[in-house]
Image (cartoon, rainbow, N blue to C red):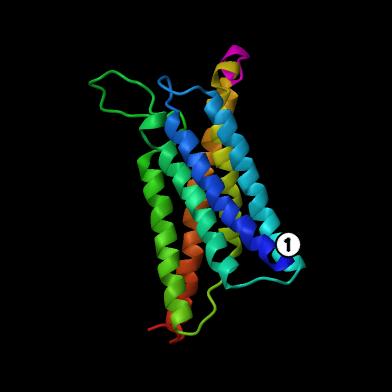
Amino acid sequence: MFRHVPNALTGFRLVLAGVFFILLSFYQYEGRGDPTLLVVASGVYIIALLTDFLDGYLARKWQVEGAFGRVVDPFADKILVLGSFIFFAGKNFVIPEHPHSLVVKTITGVAPGIVILLLARELLVTMLRGLGEGAGQSFGAVWAGKVKMAFQSGTILAILIYVAFLPWLHHNGLEPYARILRDIGVWGTVLITLYSGLGYVQRAYGMYRQGLLH
């Protein structure tokens, strides 16, 4: 009976990701969409994070870890994280500028180049893991990869709260401090993404030197 609960939570997280992205799609900074949408989206995102923790905890506790969870759980995590950053760098969060301005900024602090970096890292790690496992070598997650996921998730939540409560932050003179925290999260995500990706490259190179990869 209990063996299906962790998988159900993982599937539910994918549903929550869909709801989350729909809410983001209806919002537009200084345009259509009520800022309340972001408050609701933040709540949905928090629930998704809780299911991420709970499904892994229950699977280990009840010893029901299976192929479905090993494949779908990281897939759901990547969809939620990468999808969030794609939205944050998109037109819904662009700060309106002069029509002829050559610089486009987002209220989230996320630029398209950051999204490209995140996607490139995930594709590279997936390729290296495939090569390693195809050669019969274990290529599990490095500790930096787990830290990366936690940091990215916290940054997404910080961005959502910053944008949703921006008027309140301005009114109380807290916006500059909140923006600094937002930027620390964004650029910290860039650094931990680069560092964790380098860890996988070093591991793959070590296997290659030992003749374990061809």
The image shows residue 190, relative to residue 96, as above or below, that is below
Task: Return the residue found at the far front.
Answer: 1
The part of the image, by quadrant, that contains residue 53 is bottom right
Residue 65 pos. (x, y %): 66, 71
Query: x%, y% of residue 171?
Result: 59, 12
Disc 1 on helix, strand or loop? helix
Residue found at x 43% / y 34%: 25
The reply to whether residue 179 is visible in this rendering is no
Magenta segment range? 169-174
- Pointer 1: what residue? 58
Answer left or right for 57 relative to 45: right
**What residue is drawn where x is 58% and y is 38%?**
157
| Residue 43 falls within the magenta-colored stretch | no
Q: Residues within 10 Å of mark 1 (few under 14, many from 20)?
A: some
Question: Is residue 171 highlighted in magenta?
Answer: yes
Picture quarter with the N terminus = bottom right
User: Which residue in the rendered view is the most extreme toward the top?
Assistant: 171
Tell me if 58 is positioned left or right of 157 in this view. right
- The residue furthest right is 61
Name the foreground residue: 198 vs 141. Answer: 141
Which residue is painted at 41% across and 22% down in the image?
Answer: 32
Does the image show residue 60?
yes
Q: Nearer the viewer, residue 197 or 15?
A: 15
Q: Amino acid at mark 1?
A: Leu
In the displayed structure, 92 sits above or below 150; it is: above
Residue occupying the point 40% across, 69% down: 127
Residue found at the very far left of the displayed protein: 100
